[in-house]
Amino acid sequence: MLEEVFGGNGLGTGDNIVVCPGNYLATGFKTYTGNWFDRFGVKCALFNPDGTVGPERFETDLYGDPGGNTSNESTCNEGRVLYGITGKVYDGPASVQGLCALPSEIAKHPPLLATKDVSKLIAPSGQGGPVAAECPAGYAMVGLRVHYVDLISKLWIECEIVSRSDPPAH
């Protein structure tokens, strides 16, 4: 599994890697926010041997600080998976939007017909400068590494190679 930094200040001691189970790829996020992102989880779909994602779905647990009482979700359009994220970072992530593509397009970089996911997740603080993290060509997202103190202070994306004949076995 490869890891690419999205950004943040990295303060705090809490650290969790949130990944889809084997043979699943990331298709979206779920979060809880207060003024900042407090917890993150990943939405997943089964990656089929024919290179498509199936109807079977899975959601990871949420990791981070137990604060935040507003729940948010964002998901790629049907049949697409995450290959990166874009957004803003201040002391921690302030907005996050997934970069989505069909699994068959992931080998191209940037993927053809790439789209952003259905909705941008924005923490109420909304501050910060633009950042992005993308998996290398041929890789799709399978999860996130979440670092936190009393808010999510840094995110990394977790990437796994995608092959039609050999689904990711993380």
Image (cartoon, rainbow, N blue to C red):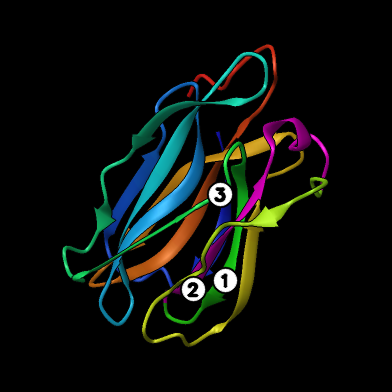
Residue 130 place in picture, x, y as percent: 63, 78
The residue pinned by badge 1 equals 87
Which residue is drawn at the image coordinates 65% and 29% (left, top)? 161
Residue with the mark numbered 2: 95
Q: Residue at x 23, y 72 (%)?
A: 150
Q: Amino acid at mark 2?
A: Ser
Span colored in magenta: 92-109
Inter-mark Cα distance, 1 to 2: 5 Å
Q: Position of residue 116 (x, y in %)?
A: 64, 59
Image position of 27 (left or right of 52): left
Q: Amino acid at mark 1?
A: Gly
Residue at position x 77%, y 36% in the image: 105
Labels 1 & 2 near each other (Cβ < 8 A): yes
User: Is residue 14 in the magenta section?
Assistant: no
Give x and y (percent) for residue 75: 49, 51
Work out whether 112 lies above or below 49: below
Between marks 3 and 2 in the image, the one whose residue lies nearer the viewer: 3
Mark nearer the N terminus (3 vs 1): 3
Nearer to me, 70 or 108: 70
* Above/below status of 74 relative to 139: below
Secondary structure at badge 2 equals strand
105 in magenta: yes
Q: CA distance from mark 3 to mark 2?
A: 16 Å
Element at label 1: strand
Residue 165, percent from left and from top: 69, 11
Quadrant placement of the N terminus:
top right
**Residue 149: which numbered mark, if any?**
none
- Of callouts 1 and 2, the N-terminal one: 1
Classify 63 as above or below 162.
below
Identify the disc placed on residue 76: 3
